[in-house]
Image: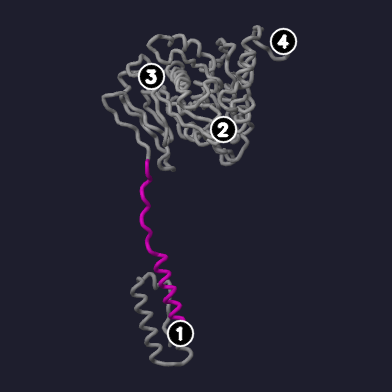
Amino acid sequence: MLPEFKLGSLAARGYKRSIAILCNLMKHSMLLTRNPIAVLFASLLGSALAFASALAQDTAALPPLPAPMDVPKPGPTNDAPYAPQAILPGGVVVTLFPPGSPYLNMAKVREAEVYNMDRSVPGRIASIVNIHNPSIEFHPGNRSLNTGAVIILAAGGGHNTLNVGGEGADFVTFMYDYGINTVILRNRLRRDGYNPKTDEVYDAQQAIKMVRAYAKDWLLDPKKIGLMGFSAGAELAAATAIEYEAFDQSNNVPQNPLASYSSRPDFVGIIYPGPSPFTRGATPPIPKDCPPSFITCAGWGDAVHAIWADEYFTAMLNGGVPNVEMHIYARGHHPGDHVGPDEPPSTGGLTDRGFISYGTWQYRFLDWFKDLGFLQKPGVETQAAKDVAANVDRPSRGSRRSGGQ
């Protein structure tokens, strides 16, 4: 009677032992008889031997994966002001204020930043806190397509953290393909003892001055420098759109190398914003050369931020500011909000948000950007600049009202 085989047990007993058993069986079957059944049995044993060999190779253990490479780390705390490190490879990092500046907290300026890493993507910085030496990080766009335009990215995080991953770093590669340069702003935060309406806004205004000062070195058009803010960062963008005159005047001192550079942005992006300077019926003055704004937010699913967006839009419209565009989307939520199982995910930045229309807002921004001439070659006057100049020359007629009043 022929012996019974279970091929699955061959691998379990070990490759060498299985081969020995099969060889012995083949040897004895051939010696005992020459009948056709024995020949068939030998053939089956040969096939089983080949299968066992392949099975043993397939079940061999894989070597362990290597650790992720080049994971970013903050710089050290030492006796000098903290030196911010690049978030992305190739970033040029410049601190906003000189050592000893009255804008800095000298008791904290030496402390290292703290990175919160993305738990699912090794090496990706999700957010940063403990920022006491604010900075900018420059990344050029595609030089073959260079428009000279640059977007300073002010991330959100409720003034409690700075979400430089989804609302900063992700835009570097996206804008690169359009010849748009990017700058990641690392501003100070309320959680670390700073005032969002003064300290954080000063960081944004100083960033605009700094970028304009280095425009020649970075092949930028000094008249195509703007700020795009997200959530809490949009609060900074909204403030920079109207508060540049006071900041420039207070910093127009001989010892300031940036004194001659304006902090006025040439455009602003207001993305799912926090409260603006016009919230709760406030009516701060709007300069006649106020820059154009692009505004976007979800509507029903993010009603509070949509109302803040609308307050800003209405103030700009009533103030006669040209080229203000707003998109409020039917579906969508604020980043981080709790949503139901049938609702689009509450992600931010460039994410597709479950393939809803809100996930394409960046392309509406590029349409607006192109319409206003910011995608032309450096040195070509933008339509935005022409319209601002015309608005400055237009006689003041007070606030514009709806309904023809």
Depth order, front residue of 322/26: 322
The residue segment tinted magenta is: 41-70
- How far is disc 2 from disc 3 in space, using C-alphas? 36 Å
Residue 405: mark:
4
Q: Is residue 22 visible?
A: yes
Q: Earlier in the sequence, mark 4 or mark 3?
A: 3
Assess disc 2: are there few (<14), some (14-19) or many (≥20) residues with their C-alpha within 10 Å of its C-alpha.
many
Task: Name which residue type carries label 1.
Answer: Phe
Residue 333: mark:
2
Residue 97: mark:
3
Read off the residue under disc 1. Answer: 41
* Front tag of 4 and 3: 3
Secondary structure at badge 3 equals loop
Task: Name which residue type carries label 2.
Answer: His
Q: Residue furthest left?
A: 79
Task: Name which residue type carries label 4.
Answer: Gln
Q: Earlier in the sequence, mark 2 or mark 1?
A: 1
Depth order, front residue of 196/378: 378
Quadrant of the rendered structure where residue 62 is?
A: bottom left
Q: Earlier in the sequence, mark 1 or mark 3?
A: 1
Secondary structure at badge 2 equals loop
x, y (%) of residue 123? 40, 40
Quadrant of the image for the C terminus? top right
* Front tag of 2 and 1: 1
- How far is disc 1 from disc 3 in space, using C-alphas? 86 Å
Secondary structure at badge 1 equals helix
- How far is disc 4 from disc 1 in space, using C-alphas? 101 Å
At x 51%, y 30%, the residue is 181
Q: Is residue 336 visible?
A: no
Task: Name which residue type carries label 3.
Answer: Phe
